Image (cartoon, rainbow, N blue to C red):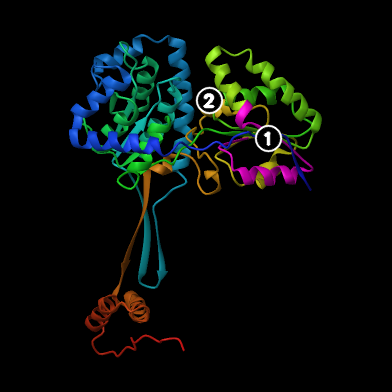
């Protein structure tokens, strides 16, 4: 078995660090100290916006009135799909209790976070779908308060489609506040918000770094890097569809990797020649992003077998993984490392990004090796509880005392001793540690 790179990435896509961290840390510190005044100053500096921050009901309704009925219907269609999938996900988590030993009952409860902060990008692209994905899942999870921040545009405010979507999905408050200052407002509880328990949603490197620096004080969905996508294809794949799917994902940004892995050289060569032609047909800003990503970060990899293709996919652990090959069930069973999987040419990453129902906030930069994407589960804490009868506690206390003394934790041991002495005063127990020879 061998792997041949017909096209090799000239650069390795990584999340920005260093100077970005210094900038973001400074902004967070100033806003935490200066509060709303500091956040407003940064809004004026970076977004050139000095309008109302927390949208009123009249402003939300006015935003809805600016949208066509067809667009509102499309957003409602997508929301319904995302909501129903999130509800199905929630059904996979249940409270339960089980008697582990006679008289010892252990249990699990799923408790939603009280306050969620959702970020919806509104810069180069206004991500209506990000509001769909983050707010809907938080609402289904049962979060007590959901805030949405999105960057306003100078003299125009928030994108009305983002406002309509956030409101439809269940946001309690919508703020015209972008970037680090938006993240800080949700984390620190500014502008009347409760302090967020969890921050979610995609953003630029400054938003991602703000979430990273705040992690621990608050929960976050994940550490995000540039978006990436991989297509696995065999001789049955349509090269035109494969090429367009690569182009569609490359337009995300100049450093967004796209990869094609195949065992069919004619397909690879056709796609490699076709992609630049397709990029040239895009609007200028989209074409610029896609051309840079294709030139510097794209790869086309030729393998000897489908097992080698699958192994390559698992090694890369892409955010988005598309299979355009025969025997789709084999791929579903075999593949193990991806954020979201798209099986067959009848589906594509854009479907998941916008309207089909699975979440588009997904692990990047190989993080799919160890985590999945945003889901209703991210907003829920799985906590445990226990209850025991005195007889049920007896063997647990004996084992606890001996293990604690073996570890040198005498205080722990005595919390077990005192219960045995109280509940069974006439009995004698051997509670000393048995030290290994």
- CA distance for labels 2 and 1: 20 Å
* 351 shown above or below 28: above
Q: How many other residues sit within 10 Å of disc 2, few (<14), some (14-19) or many (≥20)?
A: some
Secondary structure at numbered mark 2: loop
Label 1 near label 2: C-beta < 8 Å?
A: no
What residue is disc 1 on?
8
* 322 shown above or below 391: above
Q: What's the magenta region?
A: 295-321
Residue for point 55% across, 22% down: 289
Residue for point 34% across, 15% down: 153
Position in image of residue 221 (x %, y %): 41, 40
Instruction: Confirm whether residue 138 shows in the render.
Output: yes
Q: Nearer the viewer, residue 199 or 428?
A: 199
Q: Quadrant of residue 124?
A: top left
- Side (left or right) of 14 relative to 54: right
Q: How many other residues sit within 10 Å of disc 1, few (<14), some (14-19) or many (≥20)?
A: some
What residue is disc 2 on?
252
Position in image of residue 150 (x %, y %): 35, 24
Q: How many marks?
A: 2
Secondary structure at numbered mark 1: loop
Residue for point 41% across, 39% down: 18
Q: Quadrant of residue 431?
A: bottom left
- Side (left or right) of 421 relative to 76: left
**Image mark for residue 337:** none
């Amino acid at each position: 078995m061998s792997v041949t790179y017909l096209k090799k990435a000239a650069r390795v896509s990584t999340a920005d660090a260093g100077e970005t961290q210094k900038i973001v840390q400074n902004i967070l510190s100033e806003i935490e100290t200066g509060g709303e005044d500091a956040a407003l100053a940064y809004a004026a500096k970076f977004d050139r916006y000095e309008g109302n921050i927390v949208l009123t009901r009249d402003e939300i309704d006015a935003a809805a009135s600016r949208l066509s009925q067809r667009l509102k219907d499309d957003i409602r269609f997508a929301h319904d799909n995302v909501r129903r999938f999130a509800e199905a996900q929630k059904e996979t988590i249940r409270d339960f209790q089980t008697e582990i030993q006679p008289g010892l009952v252990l249990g699990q409860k799923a408790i939603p976070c009280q306050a969620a902060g959702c970020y919806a990008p509104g810069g180069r692209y206004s991500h209506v779908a990000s509001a769909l994905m983050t707010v809907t899942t938080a609402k289904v999870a049962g979060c007590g308060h959901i805030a949405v921040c999105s960057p306003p545009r100078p003299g125009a405010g928030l994108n009305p489609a983002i406002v309509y979507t956030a409101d439809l999905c269940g946001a309690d408050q919508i703020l015209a506040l972008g970037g680090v200052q938006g993240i800080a407002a949700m984390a620190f509880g500014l502008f009347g918000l409760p302090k967020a328990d969890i921050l979610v949603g995609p953003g630029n490197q400054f938003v991602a770094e703000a979430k990273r620096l705040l992690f621990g004080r608050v929960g976050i969905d994940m550490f995000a890097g540039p978006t990436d996508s991989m297509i696995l294809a065999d001789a049955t794949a349509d090269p035109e569809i494969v090429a367009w799917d690569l182009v569609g994902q490359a337009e995300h940004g100049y450093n967004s990797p796209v990869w094609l892995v195949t065992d069919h050289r004619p397909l690879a060569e056709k796609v490699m020649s076709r992609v630049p032609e397709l990029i040239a047909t895009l609007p200028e800003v989209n074409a610029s992003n896609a051309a840079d990503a294709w030139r510097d970060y794209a790869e086309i990899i030729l393998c000897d077998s489908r097992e080698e293709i699958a192994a390559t996919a698992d090694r890369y652990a892409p955010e988005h993984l598309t299979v355009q090959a025969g025997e789709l069930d084999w791929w579903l069973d075999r593949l193990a490392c991806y954020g979201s999987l798209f099986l067959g040419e009848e589906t594509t990453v854009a479907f998941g990004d916008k309207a089909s129902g699975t979440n588009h906030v997904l692990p990047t930069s190989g993080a799919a090796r160890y985590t999945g994407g945003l889901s209703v589960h991210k907003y829920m804490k799985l906590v445990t509880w226990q209850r025991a009868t005195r007889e049920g506690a007896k063997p647990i206390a004996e084992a606890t005392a001996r293990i604690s003394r073996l570890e040198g934790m005498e205080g722990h041991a005595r919390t077990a001793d005192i219960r045995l002495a109280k509940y069974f005063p006439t009995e004698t127990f051997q509670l000393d540690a048995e030290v290994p020879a």
